[in-house]
Image: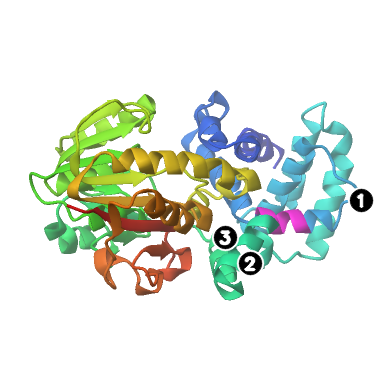
Amino acid sequence: MTEDRDIGLPARRAAIDILSAALARRAGLEEALARPAFRNLALRDRGFAMALAMATLRRLGAIERALDSRLAKPPPEAVRNILRIGVTQAFLMDTPAFAAVTTSVDLAASHSSTRAFKGLVNGVLRGLLREPPVLDDPEALCPPWLYARWTAAYGVEAARAMAALIAQEPATDLSLKSAADAAELAQALEAEILPGGALRTARKGEVTGWPAYGEGRWWVQDASAAIPARLLDVRPGESALDLCAAPGGKTLQLAAAGAEVVAVDRSAARLGRARENLERMGLKAEIVAADAGEWDDGRTFDAVLLDAPCSATGTYRRHPDVLWAARPGDVAALAGVQAKLLDSAARRVKPGGRLVYCVCSLEPEEGEAQIAGFLARQPEFELAPVAPGEAGAPEASRLADGTLRLLPHHLAGGQDGFYVARLRRRA
């Protein structure tokens, strides 16, 4: 058994590295996945490390509550991370309880900074095993300040429903190059066809090995993330501008619809993924690495899509780390950026053209309030209301003014949270 534990420690250390990076800063999780400590693991151990880190992030609020009930005072963060993954292994994974405790103690013993806390780790985890904690209370899964915001904005019932989804590993949604392939690909990928034409599959593993991936017939895109581009309703030959385009899912949608697409994003690295997917799909778009707010280009377009930078709180189903990386001040700080980008987008819409604004945020200041401010500043624009059920949007998501507040629990099985508004420039 000692040999098995020793083999497992590098994977557990990698899980702690992922967890620590994810909690320290935005994009920390992606950075940790690129480090040698993770990449040099065997494939099986990489899978274990990732599963352990993500399961911990999905129940982090409840795990914190359980640990605080057993700790007289806060231990160093390195020790707390050992305890966090110990709880996850003991109660949320298939790891035998004795192995969850023993490997956690071994982790503490393996470094001089945590060695003195071996007894604490052992005592806390054994105490929790004697009195198992509650790890599925929705109110405990979300940072308190965010849960309070959601309750104020959407009510207690909706806040609990949204928070409950934090703990659930989501299925994978796919957008299709051709809607005519839906039935065939649904069968090949063991998927259901969602309203709007996206597919949802419970398949696991590397997507590059799934049927029809190499043929360029689909790409990964959350069901709600596909709605904004559909609402532009571009026709073959129309000009379309995708601002803040990376990683490119909406660019692919516009190009697949036959539009002549220009995709702009400030991150050249992230645009690389868009180029790769365009090539795989056999689609074309003009790719521009530039700040969407400062882009010096006089062209105007029939259709403009702005997926603005935001707090990203609506993406927590796939990225639970965003809940813990977000800070109360982020929303206000991003509001000014969004207003500037909206005004920049407006200048690029032809008279009679369409503008769709969206954010993957659950915070009203980044959605409803932005559009109210925009309409006050830009009298040549008006809302073009979304019809009930249009573009596959759940009817529960349609607001009275015809904009969309896509809440995660509005679709069975969950969806990313978005705010979407469609506007028209008066001719």
Q: Residue at x 16, y 46 (%)?
A: 256
Visible residue check, residue 193: no
Instruction: Kindly check if marks 3 and 1 are in contact, taking CB atoms under 8 A apart as contact.
Output: no
Judging from the image, what secondary structure is the residue with disc 2 in?
A: helix
Q: Which residues are magenta?
A: 60-65
Instruction: Kindly check if marks 2 and 1 are in contact, taking CB atoms under 8 A apart as contact.
Output: no
Q: Residue at x 14, y 49 (%)?
A: 257
Magenta span has 5? no
Disc 1 residue type (three-letter): Ala
Instruction: Please tell me whether residue 231 is drawn above or below residue 105 in the rendered image.
Output: below
Residue named by callout 2: 138
Instruction: Please tell me whether residue 260 is drawn above or below residue 268 in the rendered image.
Output: below
- On the image, the x and y values in percent for residue 301 come to 18, 41
Which class describes the residues within 10 Å of circle 3: few (<14), some (14-19), or many (20+)? many
* Closer mark to the observer between disc 3 and disc 2: 2
Visible residue check, residue 159: yes
Residue named by callout 1: 72
Which quadrant of the view contains residue 148? bottom right
First-in-chain label (3 vs 1): 1
- On the image, the x and y values in percent for residue 217 come to 18, 47
Residue named by callout 3: 167
The quarter of the rendered structure image containing the N terminus is top right
Q: CA distance from mark 3 to mark 2?
A: 8 Å
- On the image, the x and y values in percent for residue 263 come to 26, 35
First-in-chain label (2 vs 1): 1
- On the image, the x and y values in percent for residue 422 come to 30, 57
Judging from the image, what secondary structure is the residue with disc 1 in?
A: loop
Disc 2 residue type (three-letter): Pro
